[in-house]
Amino acid sequence: MGSKEKRETPKIRLHKYIAQAGLASRREAERWIQEGRVSVNGRVVTRLGVSVDPSRDRVEVDGRPVEPRQEKVVLLLHKPRYCLTTVKDPQGRPTVMDVLGDVPWRVFPVGRLDWDATGALILTNDGELANRLLHPRYGVPKTYEVKLQGVPSEEALEKLRTGVRLEEGVTAPALVEILRRGEKATWIRMVLHQGWYRQIKRMGLAVGCPVLKIHRTAYGPIKLGTLRVGHWRPLRRDELDRLRMEVGRHVNG
């Protein structure tokens, strides 16, 4: 499913729309319609079988607007380089929402990826899930492939693993392993349980190895896989279950 794919919000039967808003059962909603208590865009509807567009039509019961319960969704986006991880930028720079394109949900990014970083980004309209994914208490791991300038010494790698002193304090222990070495640069895999501002770049500078590229391959148990750059997809049910377990197990534990 690509970022340029456009969806139209599906229409829904009026009585079902009222029921999904939690106001009544479907049968009771049908009765309200027949009694003339329901209006659509200011016009009373008494005929059953009418459909409405939740994104455009204004539905009222006894003169009070019906607010639909928003479907909770979680999306995975392969963020390209050179866009901000934010909903809107006052300076007009491109954001991940521009990459996401027209989607039938109002979602927001969970956490951040640097302007020039790429890879797995979670977006959702589930505020509770987003808060838990971001909260330090749960320490959801994030996996990166990082290109460092030069060839880091064993001492530098050990510092990255055990903790680097930054302005906020000493970074938490991290998994760090060499992926491949070149004459002028080295690729490493890093698994972090923190999300400090520009943390990876500052860690690299602190050990004398400037960061050239950052690519996130996984957010918790959710792997980027073969999702193409600039494309997105909803998480599968099994992925959602694993993601919620990642934060849920800490609640019960």
Image (cartoon, rainbow, N blue to C red):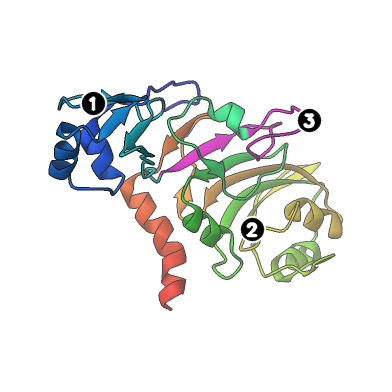
Please rate how many residues cluster around mark 3, counting C-alpha atoms within 10 Å: few if below 14, some from 14 to 19, many from 20.
few
Mark yes or no: residue 173 visible. yes
Mark yes or no: residue 152 visible. no
Would you say residue 74 sits in the magenta stretch?
yes
Q: Nearer the viewer, residue 191 or 5?
A: 5
- Which residue is under mark 3? 91
Q: Which residues are magenta?
A: 73-95
Mark 2–mark 1 distance (CA, rounded to whole Å): 65 Å
Q: Where 61 sits versus 240, above or below? A: above
Q: Residue at x 46, y 29 (%)?
A: 103
Please rate how many residues cluster around mark 2, counting C-alpha atoms within 10 Å: few if below 14, some from 14 to 19, many from 20.
some
Q: Earlier in the sequence, mark 1 or mark 3?
A: 1
Q: Earlier in the sequence, mark 2 or mark 1?
A: 1
Q: Nearer the viewer, mark 2 or mark 1?
A: 1
- Residue at the outermost bottom position: 253
Q: What amino acid is found at the position of numbered circle 3 in the picture?
A: Gln
Residue 230 percent across, percent down from the top left: 55, 28
Disc 1 secondary structure class? loop
Q: Which mark is residue 20?
A: none
Magenta span dominant secondary structure: loop
Q: What amino acid is found at the position of numbered circle 1 in the picture?
A: Val
Residue 159 percent across, percent down from the top left: 77, 67
Q: Quadrant of the C terminus?
A: bottom left
- Which residue is under mark 2? 177
Q: Quadrant of the N terminus?
A: top left
Q: Residue at x 53, y 49 (%)?
A: 218
- Which residue is under mark 1? 45
Q: Nearer the viewer, residue 236 or 190?
A: 236
Residue 229 left/right relative to 22: right
Q: Residue at x 58, y 28 (%)?
A: 99
Residue 226 percent across, percent down from the top left: 46, 35
Q: Are marks 2 and 1 in contact (CB under 8 Å)?
A: no
